[in-house]
Image (cartoon, coloured by chain):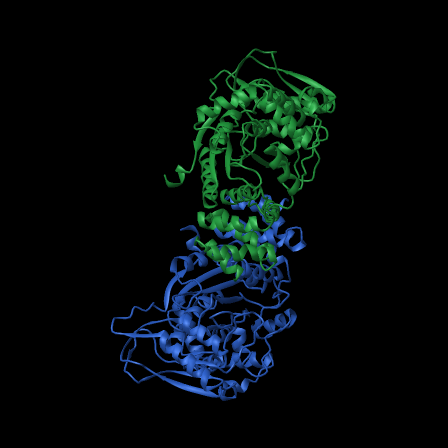
Chain colours: A green, B blue
Amino acid sequence: MNPSHIVRRKREGEELSATDIRAFLQGYVSGAVEEYQMSAFLMAVFFRGLSAAELAAMVDVMIASGLVADLSAVPGVKVDKHSTGGVGDKVSIVLAPLVASLGVPVPMMSGRGLGHTGGTVDKLESIPGFRTNLSLSEYSAQMAELGCALIAQTEEIVPLDRRLYALRDVTATVESIPLIASSIMSKKIAEGIDALVLDVKLGSGAFMPEPERAAELARTMIGIGAASGKRVVALLTAMDRPLGHAVGNALEIEECVLLLRGEGPADVREVTLALAAEMLVLGGAADDSAAASTLAAAALDDGRALNMMRAIIEAQGGNAMVLDDPAILPQAEARRVLDARRSGTVTRMDVRAIGEAGVDLGAGRRTMDAAVDAAVGFHITVKPGDRIEKGQPIATVHARDGISAEAAGLRVLDAIIIGDGPADPLPLIVQRIDEAALTA
Amino acid sequence: MNPSHIVRRKREGEELSATDIRAFLQGYVSGAVEEYQMSAFLMAVFFRGLSAAELAAMVDVMIASGLVADLSAVPGVKVDKHSTGGVGDKVSIVLAPLVASLGVPVPMMSGRGLGHTGGTVDKLESIPGFRTNLSLSEYSAQMAELGCALIAQTEEIVPLDRRLYALRDVTATVESIPLIASSIMSKKIAEGIDALVLDVKLGSGAFMPEPERAAELARTMIGIGAASGKRVVALLTAMDRPLGHAVGNALEIEECVLLLRGEGPADVREVTLALAAEMLVLGGAADDSAAASTLAAAALDDGRALNMMRAIIEAQGGNAMVLDDPAILPQAEARRVLDARRSGTVTRMDVRAIGEAGVDLGAGRRTMDAAVDAAVGFHITVKPGDRIEKGQPIATVHARDGISAEAAGLRVLDAIIIGDGPADPLPLIVQRIDEAALTA
């Protein structure tokens, strides 16, 4: 294997054999392929893409670079959900106990927030005592006992992905659909899934705002799943608004408690139920999406999902009292209510700007090793299309102090565009894509 | 300056500012830009190209990475020639003394052979005692005294090019027109030229066989020259045959001696005169190409060029007796005459295969630090279009021993395709390109 010959062939748009892909990636693991050769390869992939067969070979090597969870002691079809990330996207924290409460095991490893979007692990860690850093064996044991675990990606899973991501981050090769897809799918397969539901976000707060590219990402991940015998279904959903009202770690946990009690904002409940329905069908707990959705709504409304969450929090060392009294969550010192500057209609929301304002408050991080402030964030009660009167309270800032609350408040008001024209919000569920798209 | 942002913008096809290009390349020199970031940048350049302004900034930084020859003591317009490389291309060794003998200074730094093509420095070093490794000050002094020097690129000139080339070589980013053009032009400008004639080879023995890409390379180099106030003219010439009869270092010097005496094969004399005419016009020694060509032919025929070569060899420590008795050059032990396998017409020559056979004989090298055997090579007397009788001698192999002569002979015979159909050889001079092409 001559590394530069492999790079050249990819550069020329040739499809590499599985043997070539394996040799190149294994060479990178062993040190025979240098960082500068890998970065040239990644840039060539950015321009030339990877075929389904190339991706399958790449994902195999990535998975084999670390440990794979053994969930053979967990009966049933294990189904996880992955979101491409958004602002106020706390769905996982409601969805996982909800689906598990209906008998479908949910092995959920999540990431931390980076950039303008939040991360499930950061949110969970605002629950006092909650441990997200279970070892792979603790995780497998909890899956066998409860049918659900909510943990951070362990170092043992796909170490090659961490190395590749670090290189992509400094060589402008992050935004490549096959590289994104292989990164996500290798970790999901290694965590022990049988099936996966993807929540691909669209709109101003999404990493990939254009629908065509979002759909291509979904198809690419469905294809990788198919090559490994894992069923994957994708929903393209709206991120032209924050999901729900709460943005910020403890504030979002508080909203999750409402949702688990059958309350909470309608949009996040609707998206959660749509994703739950897909997971329940994949997991064999319902025959069709309508029946599954009814089942899931009932489990939110009658406390089964809440009880499962209580068991999960207790199993992972957290204070489950949070489900009864969210006031035990970290609270911000300064609060500032934001009033609408004018009357009109919310025509548009710059969701990325809201996310960035949250990062600057301390709710998120710009570099992987930064700490977050669990207490800070926003509560934004308006949505695109809402009719607003001047002076009406539309949001609250939760901050460490008055100065940062003031600065963040101005940015949130700027990001909620009130005008006279009509709004054109996305439907909450824009599109559904499944394996049929591979042969279409 | 954030290196990955610069890579990203190039990846997206943006034109970078001169400030960005300078910061990125200077960062690479200083260590602030990593090898893996540069290789990703180079791959992005492969796909996106570089504008004239980007190239001008890049060439500036490359030149500034080392010393620049001070030829201010040399009167006149200093004109060099650069060839993209071919098989049997010994033109420089005749052209430089020829043009210098007519009063136009020729500051010539050349490379060693790599891959299937030979290198002027390797050929010169087959002359006993000839030193090609003059220091920059020795070179400047000889230029002032003789108006000509034939040396190897010194380490002092454009060290950044050597580092970039080494990286490109292992990351499949060699074959990029802007990168090739900036590499050549930075070295030529640093060696002290005022003007340059390019000999861009076309056909089966050329690095870039397609006429469109060869013309693009010529235009790119003319553009870099224009940005630095250096006039550049390009001739696209035939490399669908070896140039002349001799292929191999000492054999080519022997052929150069014939040419300097007004003898030698017609094709290499014709290409030499065409390039000389361009250099003489650029250097102000003739008003037009026809007058310049007549001047040059006379200087070959009446011994002026030969006398200049004698002075150069003596100045550089070589044994100038070689001009009187080429038999003092290294001689190969084994010779094998090759007879045509059939009657017919030479329809085509696989010049790259002939070059590769020469490398395997020992006349060239595959890696930069390999040694060459000065004595070995070929003498091939037929050209595309020639009518051949079966059994007619068409070439001689000069080798270390009978076994390697036998193997090389078979490859040379395979590479001279004799058929019944008509031949369609390139004209020796295919096209002329000058600054007018930049505004066309």
Residue in front for this viewpoint, A241 or A186 = A186
Which one is nearer the viewer's eye here, A401 or A282?
A282
Q: Examine the rendering and report whether any part of residue B88 can be seen.
A: no
Left or right: where B74 falls relative to A321: left
- The residue at 64%/34% (across/down) is A121
The front one of B2 and A257 is: A257
In the figure, is residue A40 to the left or right of B358? right
> How many tags in the picture?
0
Residue B83 at x, y percent in the picture: 47, 67
Establish if B188 lies above or below B94: above
Residue B391: horizontal and vertical position, in percent?
30, 85
Q: Is residue B408 visible?
A: yes
Query: Which quadrant of the structure image shows residue B145?
Result: bottom right
Classify B216 as above or below A169: below
Q: Is residue A144 above or below residue B413?
A: above
Q: Residue B271 at x, y = what percent?
A: 41, 71
Of residue A355 and residue B359, the one placed in the foreground of this image is: A355
Q: Residue at x 59, y 75 (%)?
A: B132
Residue at (52% x, 46% y) in the render: B11
Residue B345: image x %, image y %? 28, 76
In this rendering, is residue A206 above or below B95?
A: above
